Amino acid sequence: MHINNIAVPPDHPRAKSLYVRELLVSGFRRGLAAPEGLIAHGRGEAYDYLLGERTTENAQLAINTAAALLLLSTRPVISVNGNTAALCPGAVVELAKVTGADIEVNIFYRTEEREEAIKAELELHGAKRVLGVGPKASARIPELHSERRRVDPDGIYTADTVLVPLEDGDRTEALVKMNKTVIAIDLNPLSRTSKAANITVVDNIVRAIPSLIEATRKLKDSTSLKKIADNFDNRKNLEDAIKIMKGEIK
Ligand code: PTJ
């Protein structure tokens, strides 16, 4: 494996983590991720370390529930920020295909250049339609003052379910107030996003989105989707995630 032209032995104990870190650095250099995204990633790494850098059973339960909800939705939208575009653009496009979701660019540190770069990256990975770029983000989420309030009237504004990886708490709360089902992917089980979302997947996005694709494929013809969704308790799931990080349960 080569990172910045330096060979990282595949048996290096931190090889995977170093590789993911480098994906983000490369995404930053290519104008996808904001500099603040590098800091956010470091915070995520710390939680991931406590999780054992694996998809726990607890996260898998949230992933299965998220898959069921995406399949039950009539207008699901995947919200994409700079970190997501840098870390797993291909998986986002694949997830959109298997769930029938739209993809919308929504960034906190909004610049036209970064919106366009993220859109181009998603298109490079096969996206046919990317919402929320430039004047298309003409609708506003009420009571929200950050740049995240600008959304596409054909996308997040009218969606019934929104998948928000690496999100900030304000918008999650505002989307829930708009009666949308919010699925968050956030390694921090203590964050406002994690607490406000209807379903929180406490897992690294680089593992969570591929697992979500797999779960969606498995559940596609299931007749128990509603039952799966109804049985999920986000509060308990977050409490369990904290217990896992404290080493109290597996
Ligand atoms: O591209 P932009 O402009 O929208 O900016 C994106 C960032 C991530 C910089 C922005 O949304 C931000 O500042 O986010 P926060 O408030 O720092 O929150 C990011 C959350 O994502 C934190 O709780 C991190 O623990 C978590 N996180 C970081 N990396 C990962 C992650 N969760 C899952 N997978 C990761 N790889």
Image (cartoon, rainbow, N blue to C red):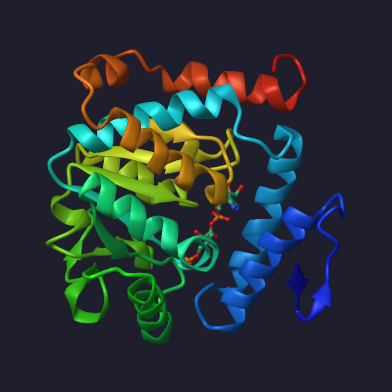
For the image, the number of numbered tags is 0
Q: Quadrant of residue 25?
A: bottom right
* Quadrant of res 181: top left
Q: Quadrant of ligand 1?
A: bottom right
Locate residue 236, reporting x and y percent.
Answer: 50, 16
- x and y percentages locating residue 247 in the rendered image: 77, 20
Of residues 91 and 73, the one drawn nearer to the viewer in this rendering:
91
User: 236 or 123, which is in the foreground?
Assistant: 123
Looking at the picture, does residue 13 appear above or below residue 241? below
- In screen coordinates, is 60 left or right of 247? left
In the rendered structure, the answer to whether residue 179 lies left or right of residue 23 reads left
Q: Residue at x 27, y 32 (%)?
A: 69
Can you say whether 70 is above or below 221 in the image? below
Residue 249 lies left or right of residue 114; in this view the side is right
Q: Quadrant of the N terminus?
A: bottom right
Q: Quadrant of the C terminus?
A: top right
Name the residue: 35% across, 55% down.
94
Residue 119 lies in quadrant: bottom left
Query: Does residue 143 appear in the picture of this structure?
Result: no
Q: Which residue appears at 83% of the width and 77% of the height?
A: 6
| Above/below status of 248 relative to 7 | above
Q: Position of residue 15 (x, y in %)?
A: 79, 56
Whether residue 20 is visible to the viewer of this picture, yes or no, is yes
Q: Residue furthest bottom?
A: 113
Q: Position of residue 24 (x, y in %)?
A: 62, 68
Residue pictured at 21% horizontal, 27% vertical: 221
